[in-house]
Image (tube, grey):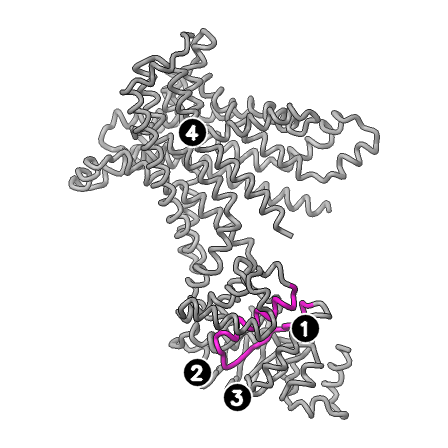
Amino acid sequence: MISIQSLNKDFGAFRALSDINARVEKGEVVVLCGPSGSGKSTLLRTLNRLEPITTGRIEIAGVDVNSRGVDINKLRQKIGFVFQQYNLFPHLTALDNIVIGLTKILKMPRDEATKRAMALLERVNLTRRASNYPAQLSGGEQQRVAIVRSLAFQPEIMLFDEPTSALDAEMIGEVLALMRELAATGMTMMCVTHEMRFAREAADRVWLMEKGKIIVDTDKAAFFNSHPNERVQRFLSSIN
Amino acid sequence: MPALDFSAIFTEHYRWLLITGLAMTLLLFVLCWVGAMAVGILLTIVRMVPFRPLELLVWAYVEYQRNVPLLVHLFVWYFGIPQLLPYSANDFINSHNSELIFAVIAIALYQAAYISEDLRSGIRTLPKVQFEAARAMGFTFLGSLRWIILPQAMRNSLPPLVNQTLLLFKATSLAAVIGVAELTYQARLIENETYRIFESFSVITVAYLAGTMPLIWLGSRLSRNNASRTR
Amino acid sequence: MWQVFSENWEFFLLGTYPRGPIGGLAMTLIIAVVSLAITFPFAIGVALLRGSKSVWVRRACEAYTTLIRGCPLLMLLLWIYFFLPQLLGFPLSPFTTLVIAIVFFQTAYLSEVIRGGIEALHKGQTEAALALGLKRWMIIWKIILPQALYNVIPGILNQFTSVIKETSLAYVIALGEVTYSASQVNGILMTRPMEVYMVLAALYFVLCFSLTQIAGLLDRRIARNRSAVR
């Protein structure tokens, strides 16, 4: 589903991503972890071309993301992206945040779009919040709306960039629950997070990044086994 | 000072002059406002395209407009431009109220520079990630501007835009100088014929204040609201 | 365009001076400087009175600024040009007329700028001064105003640019500053209005653009100084 080959990314003289080679299969849930500044978010953002890359190649469902001919907007509709700061549009209600993409990008008729949006809000128990503006919602509610806003496009891949790190502790659970549920449906997911709970419960693979490189790429069992490799151990103890 | 006599300037003839003057002021105002908004929004969009020469071009335009008096812009358009146009174009313009046409162009282009500045600062207060979020959803560059960025920028810029509307309304009075028969022009005409200075100027003063006071009120209300909404 | 300027530059810049009365860009600057100099104390007065204890004084000042903001400067100028001599019983020169109009107009705007500077100061400044036992007017004069005025120097400079642009209305009352001079040049040359008025625009541009750039520079410097103090 996702294939990354010899990827390099420079910010000026600083090498943010260095010779990344990795694959994600369809239906896999990958958790990216690592110390801050290790390049996790940058890597995630290169996948839908929010960050242009310096050299290398990224393929998503067989399409070269950075080739000139690709219709990036079409491609991005297949890739849901969830931000740390939710990034709902503050001038639109929760419902319209979902509807606007359907009507303006997919050109769906308004009533059909509304129906789909309401169904999604119902899935996350937020029907009663449909006509509220983002500023009137809690952080957890905003993030759930942001997630279903991406789901409205029926994407093939969901990317999560630290989706819970801006949330108060009591709201993290509701967002993680939604993500677990999504993982269970067979969605291909990549998630940058420090929530090892989520990795333990829902991930198939874990990538550990350090200084722009993927230093560990292994399945979950190996990552969390009782005799972990030394670098994993160092990371796990550093976040607990 | 002679005794006040408003009836002297409310004869049928002068009443007609005042009414057409008012109509002309309103027409000027509406045309200029639409033109200024359109050009102002266009400039704002062009400015967001990450291409240096375009940015510089818009910057130069805005600086030129803002650092030269409106009266001079009016002269350049009304006296200067016909020199550059072919005869046929001048004939056409002269037979279609050239004063009005050039006044609208000059005032609209002038105010557009200010409007684009206000919109730009409205956009700059938006977090950059709003744009990213829209792009990540699959909105095109223009789509993100149209549906996500501009509506928010408009709301942020509403108080300054109301203020620009106020300034534009007042600026229409300068069109009198190149001979557009709007309120100020008619008042001078009436004053000139009747020597009723106080009466004729009072009438247009009331007319201008009737237009500007609601705008001032609206502007201060909106900026109060915005101030209380930012948390 | 250059030819028009090089052949008439003395008239554009000085009018007929030294043979006759001064005009052109020099006159523009004289009107602007004189107007702003007279406006300044009035504007400070209105700005301070808007913080007065008396509701009526505050209301009166607010009514004045609102009313002026609602009036086109051209209309104000015509009032003063035609009506004020009638009211006073003696004629006013065009120069005096324009200066009065601009002072009336700019007092409203400049007082808002200064008031903004006063309100931006921390409340603690007044409280600290009160705690020292300073009298109210001493606080205003020695503590508040110097800081507020220093901080709004860029705003005052920008207002000066506005004043320069406003002096172009002198044309309407046939006062010989640069816009009027340009129209005279145009009247003599007859066939080259575009060049003449582009020269005029260029003169204003050079003057006003330099001023706004200086204002921007000062604004950044003052902002930096303030953040350094904190």
Where in the figure is residue B21, as x and y percent of width and height? 32, 28
The span from disc 1 to disc 2 (Cα, nearest Å) is 30 Å
> SS at mark 2?
strand
Residue drawn 48% across the image and 51% down it: B154
Q: Which of marks 3 and 1 is in front?
A: 3
Return the mark for residue B76.
Answer: none
The span from disc 4 to disc 2 (Cα, nearest Å) is 63 Å
Residues A210 and C18: in front is A210
Q: Mark 2 lies on which chain?
A: A
Residue C194 shows in the view: no
Residues A8 and B62: in front is B62
Q: Quick one: which residue is furthest to the front in this view? A: A128
Where in the figure is residue A44, as x and y percent of width and height? 57, 76
Q: Which of marks 1 and 2 is in front?
A: 2
Q: In which quarter of the image is residue C9?
A: top left
Q: Find disc 1 in the rendering and name its residue.
A: A36
Q: Find disc 3 in the rendering and name its residue.
A: A26
Residue drawn 48% across the image and 71% down it: A115
